[in-house]
Image (cartoon, coloured by chain):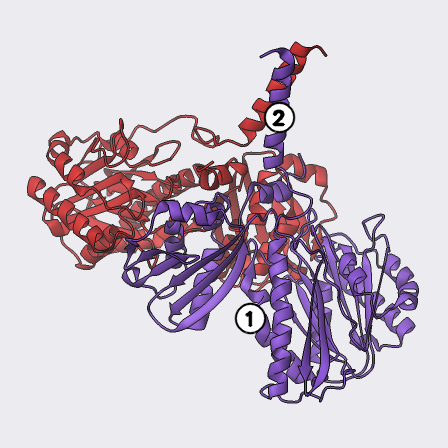
Chain colours: A red, B purple
Amino acid sequence: MNAEQKIAALEAELAKLKAQYSAPEVSPLAPVSGFPDLPVVRGVRFASGAAGVKYQGRDDVMLMVCDAGTSVAGVFTRSATRSANVLDCQRKLALGAGDGPVAIVVNSGNSNAFTGREGDNSVAAICNAVADVSGVPAERVFTASTGVIGERLPHDRIIAKVSELHGDLSVDGAAGAAHAIMTTDTFAKGAAVSINIGGEAVEIVGFAKGSGMIAPDMATMLVYIATDANVDQGVLQSILSDLNEGTFNSITVDSDTSTSDSLMLVATGKSDAPRIMDADSSDAIAFADGLRDVMLDLSHQVVRDGEGATKFLEITVRGAASEASAKTVGLAIANSPLVKTAVAGEDPNWGRVVMGVGKSGEPADRDKLSIWFGDILVAENGWVSSSYTEEAGVEYMKNADLKITCDLGVGDGEATVWTCDLTHQYIVINGDYRS
Amino acid sequence: MNAEQKIAALEAELAKLKAQYSAPEVSPLAPVSGFPDLPVVRGVRFASGAAGVKYQGRDDVMLMVCDAGTSVAGVFTRSATRSANVLDCQRKLALGAGDGPVAIVVNSGNSNAFTGREGDNSVAAICNAVADVSGVPAERVFTASTGVIGERLPHDRIIAKVSELHGDLSVDGAAGAAHAIMTTDTFAKGAAVSINIGGEAVEIVGFAKGSGMIAPDMATMLVYIATDANVDQGVLQSILSDLNEGTFNSITVDSDTSTSDSLMLVATGKSDAPRIMDADSSDAIAFADGLRDVMLDLSHQVVRDGEGATKFLEITVRGAASEASAKTVGLAIANSPLVKTAVAGEDPNWGRVVMGVGKSGEPADRDKLSIWFGDILVAENGWVSSSYTEEAGVEYMKNADLKITCDLGVGDGEATVWTCDLTHQYIVINGDYRS
């Protein structure tokens, strides 16, 4: 090998190593089709703009205003150190029913979390400003902030933009709003379904951000869903809370919980569909089915943009003592760093799945446990399956989308959770930004 | 730059990158003094040898025999999928008191976990073989296995060595035993204290393995402690279980739980110290103090050999609603991948500590929470401390041994836990071994 060839070989090896240990600009699991077209939801308008909270040269604030007659529901982080915004939203939702107009204002670049009493003051100031310009009562203005924590939110910059945002409100502004709330997301996340309730078309449109990270922030997840269905507020909250368990509360990237996670759902009632007053009615079930599709789609996109993710992993646990037990076992597997690094390494390491079942603390029986990777039966009767070959396992693990199924053999409980792998890129994103 | 210089520069860059992303042969947190001298414990003899279970060219089995008059106690993994060996040990200990002789036989290279009924048969065959050669009743022979899981334990190889091991038993064989049970530990772990009970010298000697990993194994931790104190079995078990909460049950490397974790403690009664019959007596307290020192020392060594560890992190939570609550909060922080990657990146990211407090689900109040890094007050009254500077935080994080203290301000509960950082090396060790 001459000097030139040697230099070329060294450069190639260096480039390969650097690629292996650096975070990609766009997740390899991003949808190839890009951000979806979102249909108009009657009664909701969106605007976005650049307030310069922290980022320069991009939109960082979005305003969403819903006409009078809107029901609103929400689910939030259970963190004991939740942000001022979350506490304010929860207080307002607890005030109960009502169908006035609704406004939601969200900024990226600063999470307003752990900012003491100043944080509460910032929320109040923003809500009052939005109320002034929009006519929406301040008690029906909801906020969220995502970005750096522990720094005072420069709420004056947001307030200075409120008038302009209000003037820009548009029925087709959802895509812009979805982009404005991104932090270090590598792609914007949107989803929509059109359903039929009582013979009338109803749209359900949603967008989300997460689980990108901005130092020294936490992986906040924000989700906003709007529909023109006509739904009583109590029913809306009940459907949302119920669906949340099997969607956003069934995903995990790294087991950590943000101080700011928020999901808000507004129903404007501006479609011609009949009003839904009973969560058990066929109309409610049709609505919930459509809403589930949007929530599942968005929650999976959040996992696919998990920091450093190169594999999307669905884990189904069945034969558990109960549904709750199945979910606990599923999350024990999904949150196991040993499982997640094995998946990253394309290693069919079923022993770590056994370990995950064991550590969950839930009822299980070694001799009744069966494990599948995709359709491949890996283990049964407390031992590796006689039909299993390591070659088949290795081949299966090369897929980007993977499915692990465990049958515990002790009951009828079943649950599915979703996660991603744990890679060098996760460490790069979360540990290396000072180097 | 000429071709030669260019090649040298590229080679240097390549070497630097490779060093950054490869696991060190010995943990940078290994004790600089090496394996300690372990004093003789009267009434206990050790032997080790090479049975060729899996490893070649190194010892992989140890035998420990205690004279008649020995009390024995143990604590084990709570995993629902625990190994045949653990189940057998637990069954035998549950048979209750007795002060006959005791034997313990441990192999590395194969964990005998998730090997179905064959695993139970292997344990019985080994115990019978040890009973035959040593005269120790099979019901007082205890076993552990650590290494690859899901493969039949070749117990014939161990049984073939039992006679030779029995012939080699020696009072100063503890160091050899400590080395024989290692899997991918980067250093052997031993600790000893000499105490005084009733004016008589008593030795407490222990060794441990963990949390090294051998593909596709789990991070099994095994600990054996011997003393010549004279302790009633019920009291011995009570002291051990109590101390375990604050030592081995207060450490975490990656939140995962092995199917095989075992800690066994034997007390031969061969010192001249008076027999301890009451866990509240001053003699019992003196004994427990010494035992705690050995257990803390060994548990910290396990963390220091945590896979990929470059930082040793002590987390104290005080002002919690209860001691249990403090420990839950401490482990939530210690197991947070976001905290652990920040520590690896030498980032004084107190926001992630706030997040860890919040996600624990335990009572906390944003406005009463205080956080220290070492002696540096970082946050108080729900916000960053006015005296805190980022420069001081960055400088502190450069230490290899770090201490984080949280005061929740809601009660009197206090607990301390220990962990290590989450680095590229963890991913290399657990995810990369196929590449």
Specify the amino acid type for callout 1: Glu
Judged by depth in the image, the label closer to the viewer, 2 or 1, is 2
Q: Residue B329: which numbered mark, if any?
A: none
Q: Position of residue A212 (x, y in %)?
A: 39, 39
Residue B361 visible in image: no
Provide the chain ID for the residue under circle 1: B
- Which of the two residues, B387 or A3, is positioned nearer the viewer here? B387
Residue A337 against residue A209 in the figure, above or below: below
- Which of the two residues, B198 or B231, is positioned nearer the viewer here? B198
In the image, taking residue B141 as reference, residue B433 lies left or right, namely left
Q: Earlier in the sequence, mark 2 or mark 1?
A: 2
Residue B7 against residue A82 in the figure, above or below: above
Identified at 17% across, 38% down, the residue is: A158
Q: Which quadrant of the rendered structure holds the C terminus of chain B?
A: top right
Q: Residues within 10 Å of mark 1 (few under 14, many from 20)?
A: few
Specify the amino acid type for callout 2: Ala
Query: What residue did someone put label 2 on?
Result: B12
Residue A89 against residue A271 in the figure, above or below: below
Q: Circle 1 sits in a helix, a strand or a loop, which is it?
A: helix
